[in-house]
Image (tube, helix red, strand yellow):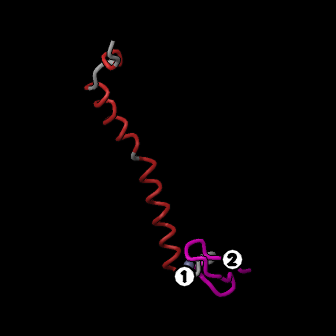
Amino acid sequence: MKRRCPICKKLADSETDADFPFCSERCRLLDLGNWASERYVISEPAFDESMFEDLERDAPPSDADGHE
Ligand SMILES: [Zn+2]
């Protein structure tokens, strides 16, 4: 069974590549790294939200924005 490596798109063979569907251990580790960094990005907004809350508290009320 042959499949394209999801990282570098090189053709990998399930018969010969131990890291199938990746063409090499390097690509397999790269994919793990991508997955880990995605998790990191997803968990980050919880921290950012509290920063935005502080900004909103400091911002003037919305009615002060309209000049009459
Ligand atoms: Zn590859």
Q: Residues within 10 Å of mark 2 (few under 14, many from 20)?
A: some
Q: Is residue 52 above or below residue 64?
A: below
Instruction: Locate the C terminus by quadrant.
Output: top left
Three-letter amino acid code of the residue under disc 2: Arg
List the residue tagged with mark 2.
3
Q: Residue furthest right?
A: 1
Q: Secondary structure beneath disc 1?
A: loop
Measured in 3D between alpha carbons, the distance from the residue under mark 2 to the one under mark 1, in whole angstroms, is: 13 Å
The residue carrying mark 2 has its beta carbon less than 8 Å from ligand 1: no
Instruction: Locate the N terminus by quadrant.
Output: bottom right
Residue 60 image position (x, y, % from top left): 28, 21
Tell me the residue at 48%/71% (across/down): 30
Q: Residues within 10 Å of mark 1 (few under 14, many from 20)?
A: some
Principal secondary structure, stretch drawn in magenta: loop
Q: Which quadrant does ligand 1 occupy?
A: bottom right
Q: Secondary structure beneath disc 2?
A: strand
Q: Is residue 11 magenta?
A: yes
Three-letter amino acid code of the residue under disc 1: Ser
Circles 2 and 1 in contact, beta carbons < 8 Å: no
Total labels: the figure holds 2
The residue carrying mark 1 has its beta carbon less than 8 Å from ligand 1: yes
Residue 12 image position (x, y, % from top left): 64, 82
Q: Is residue 27 above or below residue 58?
A: below
Q: Residue furthest left?
A: 58
Numbered tag placed on residue 24 in the rendering: 1
The segment highlighted magenta reads 1-19
Tell me the residue at 37%/36% (across/down): 49
Tell me the residue at 34%/15% (across/down): 63
Q: Is residue 63 above or below residue 29?
A: above
